[in-house]
Image: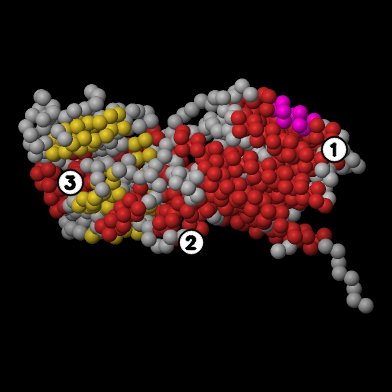
Amino acid sequence: MPNTRRPYLLAALLTAAAVCGGDAVARVFPFGPRHRAVNDLANQFVPFHAHLWDLLRGRADGGLPLDWQAGWGTSFLPDYGTYLSSPFAPLVALLPRGDIEYAVYAITVLKTAAAAAAMTFLLCRLGPATRWWASVLGASYALCGWSLAEGEYNPMWLDGLIAFPLLCLVGEWAREGRRPLLGPLVVAVCWVANFYTAYMATLGAALVLLVRIAVADSATARATVRATTREGLRVLLRAGLTTGIGIALAAPVLVPVLLGSRHAHPGLDREFDPAPAADVLARLLPVTYSFATPAAFVCTAVPLLVGALLFRRDVPGRERRLWAGLCVGVVASMQWGPTHLLWHAFATPNGSPYRQTFVLAGVLVLAAWAGFAHGPPDRRALLGGTAVVLALVAGSLPSPFLTPWALLLTGVGLAAVAGALLLPRRGRYGALAALLVTGTLLGQAAATTAYADRERLARLDDYPPWGAEQERRATALAAADGWPAYRTDPGLPRVAGNDPLLLGGQGAAYYSSHTPAVLTETLTALGGGWTSRGRNLLSLDNPVTDALFGVGARWRDGRLVRAEPLPLVTVRPPGPAPAYGPSPFRNQELLLGSRVYGAPAADGSCPVGTEVFLWAPDVTGTARLGTYETRLLGGRPKRRAALVSLGIARTPGTEPSVPAPGGELACLDHDRLRTALAALRARAATSVRITSGGLTATLPPGTTGTAVVAAPRIAGWRCQNTRAGAYGGLLALDLAPGTTTLTCSFRTPGLRAGLAAGTGGLLLLALRTALAARNGRRARPPAPLSP
């Protein structure tokens, strides 16, 4: 391998060693008994990657347009663009599906290592210095606190960690007037990989470009102010054009994601509350953890070099002020409400409010390298940098997040790095210096990783990892699968928020940033439960809704239970669509078209032989009927308990025990339900064919009324070449006389506009490339004449 590649490989290896070493110290999967299945990693990323595995292997129900497995049928392209569009994601298909957690972990480590290599490449491109220092600083960026504390369980964000140095490189190409074809393609890949963090990385790269332009202007002594200003504007115009073309190329994915967010159930509106200054300073140190403060830790070598830059006489004053000002400005922008909103696309995020912290880590590393490009700091500058680090530590002392290990590792690291910078740079002293600095990096990063692993498990929601029980359940669901004749619901108890994607089958459970509002509203009206304020929908175990949504097999209490469902397409008599009210029992009857629930007696008991159901959405506790008991977990606005069965009434006068008042009881008559289903089955479709982009149903001759599809009426559906209607939140169409075939197709909202924007971007890219090639030919000197 050529010597020029060694710094990038070294940075990647250091990064992988630190991450894996820290996980091994914490004894976390895959190096110990503690699992990693916390929060969105378990609820979203692992299940979505499992679904991608199924798609790539041809085993999924649906395709890019539609996911027929989760949420009773939802638009999948927005989820793909949010969770799975990274170039690294398809690597999951290289491992068996049962090893999906290993695959996601491997991708996480690989992304972090790639970020280190990308930053190292950028540093080597920006200026000359010792190559192993570029590797250490590149790895320091990839091993920042944000990466170790946040990115490890939000692996889609790590694409932004890679994007920042790549977009800074695109800025360099714009400054030099080079790479007119490659620049927009890099931007497009970054924005497709993860638009959310790519947006933040683009803002950060723009700030870095402004500093680079200003530094270059100050170094050009012979240029006039007007000429340098004009050239700076040309650079910004080239950079803006490059970015615009790149984003346009990514539009076929970005626009559906944007519209998917607009159609989604609204999340929580939060007011930004800036973190105390002492806490912000504490998070610059290793071995600290907090969910609501910026995880700004970088190896102590970085703040030491940035502090030393302030005292270096061999670096032009303007350059020192610009880089220092950029570092301070980014920190200040993270703490001020308006700029906080700018960083987060004008919406305070649910959860961690400092998701742009990786940009700060990158800016600090670039500032450290800016000084190194002029050579190592002298003793005076090194003393000043040490004083700066000690001042930061002193400012962090009041913070409750500060740990003894943080102070110890910072002190040892400061001494080791300062000593390394004082050693001669050749021979065995150079090797000793490299050992001291890389040892500091690996020790601090591994310790921070281990500490974050332990704290996440203690503070965040955790879920069962994939194991023998999940494998048994998935095997049973696969054996029972009869789609599209009927649905197989993975049921309860749930493993994660997207059990249909993880375990198999087709159910109501679904958790995404794009959970459709109509799906949440419909499920809620029918008695469904949810968490995450309505975006994490739970499976609804109820005979009426199972029949209406075609659930013919369901996992319940460790075994598979069969039922006789309706076909996916039924026909209701002519008349108005149901208007839901406050009672889920009455709403189910409206959708069914028959009365099947009875009211309990005055003493709260149900007739013998009926099934007792309780609806208590805001109750947390255990409800009982005789010896049967079930657990409720409610409490709006964060959670809503689902309508639950308390079993069949066996003894007259038995009253259920409910942990709190305020619920509603109803008695389901199964004989009435069978009669109602028989009437609907007589008018249902005789066959249904499902595709990745729609469905076709064959109806009995002479059918009239409203065809109802057991899928939510999300935006994008058309039936019989006209906009589809809704029937109680479900996809529906009033049938014309003589209709025997119903054809419905789904087109992802925004896909047509995205393709148009992408085509425009492609034309602009071709035009710009052609113009650049023509200008290059004009500027090329003519070949010498042959003698």
Characterize the local packing of mark 1: few (<14), some (14-19) or many (20 or more) Cα atoms within 10 angstroms: some
The magenta segment is 384-392
Classify residue 785 as left or right of residue 772. Answer: right
Name the residue that disc number 2 marks: 94
Q: Nearer the viewer, residue 472 or 253?
A: 472
Q: Secondary structure at mark 3?
A: loop
Judged from the image, the secondary structure of the residue bearing numbered disc 1 is: loop
Q: Which mark is residue 434?
A: none
From where the camera sits, is residue 111 visible? no
| Eye-nearest disc, 1 or 3 | 1
Horizontal relation, residue 253 to residue 435: left or right: left
Q: At x 18% / y 51%, what residue is drawn?
A: 563
In the picture of the structure, the residue carrying the numbered disc 1 is 378
> Residue tagged by mark 3?
573
As shown in the figure, which amino acid type bears the numbered disc 2?
Leu
Amino acid type at circle 1 is: Asp
Apparent side of residue 411 relative to residue 129 in the rendered image (left or right): left
Q: Residue at x 50, y 49 (%)?
A: 31
Image height check: is 224 above or below 181? Answer: above
Kind of residue sitting beneath label 3? Pro
Instruction: State the quadrant of the N terminus.
Output: bottom right
